[in-house]
Image (cartoon, rainbow, N blue to C red):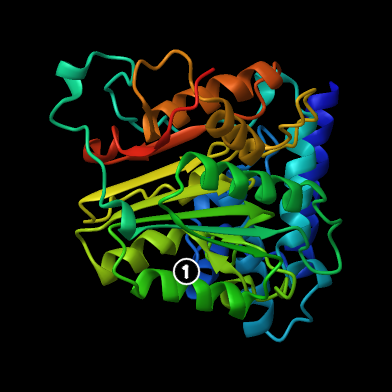
């Protein structure tokens, strides 16, 4: 057995052990109790997860653990410590993924369609979609969380990257109303998001940086310093729900969500919202991990790359302004240059109407 098989076997062996610890429920029982716990876990998927053929997807792991916990609770079986939260399982999954050989990584979901227009095409090809929101009604909310409770090491690059991004936005888009929150509590972050959503902005950009985990419902969440690992659903920022919140406020506004966390691509909705203009730019795919890169120019993480692009401009673009597609494509190329192993892949999606959003000045040198 090779090193990759060993990594997968060690991980799924822990899942099998957890199942035994709660009384060896059948896979059909796990399907039933996953549903009662608010998750989705077909019996066949639960069976595949513990066979060791491949690393199960993180959403499957969370549903499996939740089902075991619910089964134990309903049958009077003491709940094992490792069934009480999913933090440690996601950490173990990330370590296993990072150690796999390139050809044996977790299978990626089908790539989502991305806007097809080329941001370098001529003005005549984009004239119907080139637009600039009313500049006095544009807001940028930047939330950075460098701490994630007592069990996780601080992300020391988050404050630096947020400061750099803040300065870059002020220089490239001085018309933006910029709010930056560093290490807020869960309540403080939610209060600021609600205020931003309630205001009559024509364009709202929400940019989050920090630890990304999947909560008990397998939804992507930003972990705050006071998040509770056994209750992520109520004590973290639900990133998948941000577009839904904006949708309820106004369907006419433009909303951009920039996510710099692991599993960031999970913030892209599987069912597009009814918002007229929306765009999600994610540091990595739905089942991918985000890393920090110590480049010579100090760009660091995905947020650092975006700040660098805003500061230095995009030379290949013939336009005086930077669009969302410029940032999406250029940041993707920049990450690929830093990560030759292909572990981190930028992804994005949104409405075609926002492809050519004039977000900031192009400071190409």
Image quadrant where residue 128 sits: top left
Judge whether 204 appears above or below 124 on screen: below
Q: Residues within 10 Å of mark 1 (few under 14, many from 20)?
A: some
Q: Residue at x 35, y 15 (%)?
A: 318
Image quadrant where residue 130 sits: top left
Q: Quadrant of the N terminus?
A: top right
Whether residue 1 is visible, yes or no, is no
Total marks in image: 1
Rendered location of residue 35, percent (x, y):
47, 69
Q: Quadrant of the C terminus?
A: top right
Judge whether 121 appears above or below 313 on screen: above
Q: Residue at x 47, y 51 (%)?
A: 267
Image quadrant where residue 161 sits: top right
Residue 64 shown left or right of residue 146 in the figure = left
Find the residue positioned furthest to the bottom: 76
Judge whether 331 appears above or below 273 on screen: above
Closer to the camera in the image, 250 or 94:
250
Closer to the camera in the image, 199 or 75:
199
Q: Which residue is mark 1?
A: 35
Closer to the camera in the image, 348 or 185:
185
Say what secondary structure mark 1 lies in: helix
Rendered location of residue 83, percent (x, y):
74, 69
Q: Residue at x 27, y 71 (%)?
A: 249
Residue 99 shown left or right of residue 263 in the figure = right
Whether residue 238 is visible, yes or no, is yes
Rendered location of residue 151, percent (x, y):
86, 64
């Amino acid at each position: 057995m090779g090193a990759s098989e060993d990594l997968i076997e060690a991980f799924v062996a822990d899942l099998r052990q957890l199942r035994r610890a709660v009384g060896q429920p059948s896979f059909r029982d796990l399907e039933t109790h996953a549903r009662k716990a608010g998750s989705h876990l077909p019996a066949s998927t639960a069976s595949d997860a513990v066979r060791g053929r491949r690393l199960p997807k993180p959403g499957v792991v969370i549903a499996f653990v939740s089902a075991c916990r619910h089964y134990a609770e309903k049958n009077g079986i003491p709940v094992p410590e490792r069934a009480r939260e999913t933090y440690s399982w996601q950490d173990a999954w990330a370590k296993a993924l990072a150690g796999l050989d390139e050809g044996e990584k977790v299978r990626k979901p089908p790539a989502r369609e991305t806007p097809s227009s080329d941001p370098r095409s001529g003005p005549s090809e984009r004239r119907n979609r080139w637009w600039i929101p009313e500049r006095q009604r544009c807001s940028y909310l930047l939330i950075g969380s460098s701490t994630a409770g007592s069990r996780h090491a601080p992300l020391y690059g988050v404050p630096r990257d947020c400061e750099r991004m803040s300065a870059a936005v002020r220089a490239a888009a001085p018309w933006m109303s910029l709010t930056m929150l560093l290490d807020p509590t869960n309540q403080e972050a939610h209060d600021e998001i609600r205020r931003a959503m309630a205001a009559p902005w024509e364009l709202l950009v929400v940019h989050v940086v920090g630890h990304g985990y999947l909560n008990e419902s397998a939804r992507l969440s930003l972990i705050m310093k006071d998040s509770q690992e056994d209750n992520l659903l109520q004590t973290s920022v639900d990133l998948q729900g941000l577009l839904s919140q904006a949708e309820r406020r106004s369907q006419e506004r433009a909303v951009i969500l920039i996510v710099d966390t692991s599993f960031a691509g999970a913030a892209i909705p599987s069912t597009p919202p009814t918002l007229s203009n929306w765009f999600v730019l994610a540091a990595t795919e739905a089942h991918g991990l985000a890393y920090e890169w110590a480049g010579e120019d100090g760009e660091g993480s995905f947020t650092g790359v975006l700040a660098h692009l805003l500061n230095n401009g995009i030379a290949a673009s013939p336009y005086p302004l930077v669009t969302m597609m410029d940032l999406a494509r250029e940041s993707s190329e920049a990450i690929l240059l830093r990560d030759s192993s292909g572990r981190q892949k930028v992804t994005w999606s949104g409405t075609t109407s926002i492809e050519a959003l004039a977000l900031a000045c192009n400071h190409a040198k």
